[in-house]
């Protein structure tokens, strides 16, 4: 256990350093170049007016949103993979992102406002949509004798995702041109949360739900050993599974509400984390969170810098990496 702890600590330190480097580079990416030295000076209050405006009004809010969302998606994927005992589980594949997309479309249909105070409600609507999708999945995956069957979660999730996607597409066709353009870009994973109000909308969800999930690490350790073992050590299996599923829905739905329907982060980050530090959740979940952060900030930065001035959505960059990785996992998983 001591060796695993030391390994987890070493991996965490390396990932924190990599994340800091990527964030620093990302703050320097855009039409107006700021050197790393100028970025650091501005962050500590020694920059000029132009640097402060570019950094604090435009770049920093967007990067904080991608950092928070990456953490949320990484941990949500980790929860779902452990609950379903399947390395192919992911908020996108299992249908939660499709439910969140439905919630967002309902929001823009009735509110039409994506800026200012109404945007604080967006994560609530995406959470509602994600929760609705999860409820349908749980009802269909539930067995009277066996309870919630993990393998059914994924199979039912794929079908539910298809249904919600069709419903979302139908509703989006009724939107005006500007809102439809926003919705279509959101669906491919466009990071649109670029103001401090969007950071404020996402922050409470991550700050509250991440510690709650980490507190359930021992429960997740027990659940991955099977329901019989978990019950024998005093875990109330069905109740805990529903609680953890709700936490995953909250983290995934709030994250995609500001960054668009990004898939594969919840698949890749936990899988890499498990390879790096093993399957004990007290080590594996924080590493999964940092990997999610690193992947999403890197993808957004690549999308903005390589193809400048025509930025491509972060979701497209993630899918470019994630889709081959998913196929690789599919061939390795028996």
Image (cartoon, rainbow, N blue to C red):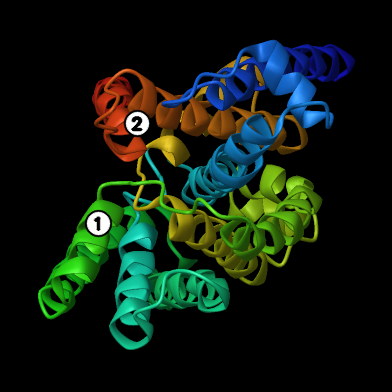
User: Which quadrant holds the C terminus?
Assistant: top left
Mark 2 residue element:
helix
Residue drawn at 32 percent across, 39 percent down = 315
**Which x, y percent locates residue 73?**
52, 45
**Which x, y percent locates residue 9?**
81, 18
**Which x, y percent locates residue 303?**
34, 28
Vertical side of 325 occupied by 109: above or below:
below
Q: Mark 1 points at which residue?
A: 158
- Give the left or right position of residue 298, taking residue 200 as reference: left
Does the rendering let one see residue 140? no
Residue drawn at 42 percent across, 32 percent down = 300
Q: Name the residue under label 2.
A: 318
Q: Quadrant of residue 285?
A: top right
**Which x, y percent locates residue 136?**
35, 76
For this rendering, which residue is in front, 262 or 230? Answer: 262
Residue drawn at 52 percent across, 22 percent down = 272
> Which of the two marks, 2 or 1, is nearer to us in this view?
2
Vertical side of 190 occupied by 285: above or below:
above
Residue drawn at 26 percent across, 26 percent down = 320
Vertical side of 148 occupied by 108: above or below:
below
């Amino acid at each position: 256990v001591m060796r695993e702890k030391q390994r987890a600590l070493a991996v965490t330190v390396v990932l924190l350093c990599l994340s800091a480097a990527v964030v620093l580079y990302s703050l320097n990416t855009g039409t107006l170049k700021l050197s790393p030295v100028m970025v650091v000076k501005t962050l500590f209050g020694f920059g000029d007016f132009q640097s402060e405006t570019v950094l604090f009004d435009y770049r920093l809010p967007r990067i904080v949103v991608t950092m928070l969302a990456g953490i949320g998606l990484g941990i949500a994927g980790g929860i779902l993979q452990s609950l379903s005992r399947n390395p192919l589980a992911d908020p996108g594949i299992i249908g939660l992102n499709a439910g969140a997309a439905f919630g967002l479309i309902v929001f823009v249909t009735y509110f039409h406002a994506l800026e200012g105070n109404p945007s604080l409600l967006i994560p609530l609507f995406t959470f509602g949509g994600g929760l609705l999708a999860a409820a349908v999945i749980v009802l269909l995956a539930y067995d009277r004798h066996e309870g919630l069957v993990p393998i059914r979660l994924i199979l039912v999730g794929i079908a539910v995702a298809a249904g919600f996607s069709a419903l979302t597409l139908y509703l989006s066709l009724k939107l005006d041109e500007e809102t439809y353009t926003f919705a279509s870009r959101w669906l491919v994973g466009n990071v649109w949360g670029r103001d401090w109000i969007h950071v404020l909308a996402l922050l409470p969800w991550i700050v509250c739900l991440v510690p709650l999930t980490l507190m359930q690490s021992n429960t997740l350790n027990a659940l991955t050993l099977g329901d019989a073992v978990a019950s024998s050590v005093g875990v109330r299996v069905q109740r805990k599974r529903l609680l953890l599923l709700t936490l995953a829905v909250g983290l995934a739905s709030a994250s995609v509400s500001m960054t668009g329907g990004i898939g594969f982060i919840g698949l890749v980050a936990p899988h890499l984390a498990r390879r790096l530090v093993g399957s004990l959740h007290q080590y594996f979940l924080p590493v999964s969170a940092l990997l999610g952060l690193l992947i999403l900030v890197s993808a957004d930065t690549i999308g903005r810098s390589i193809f400048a001035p025509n930025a491509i959505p972060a979701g497209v960059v993630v899918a470019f990496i994630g889709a081959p990785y998913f196929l690789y996992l599919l061939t390795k998983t028996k």
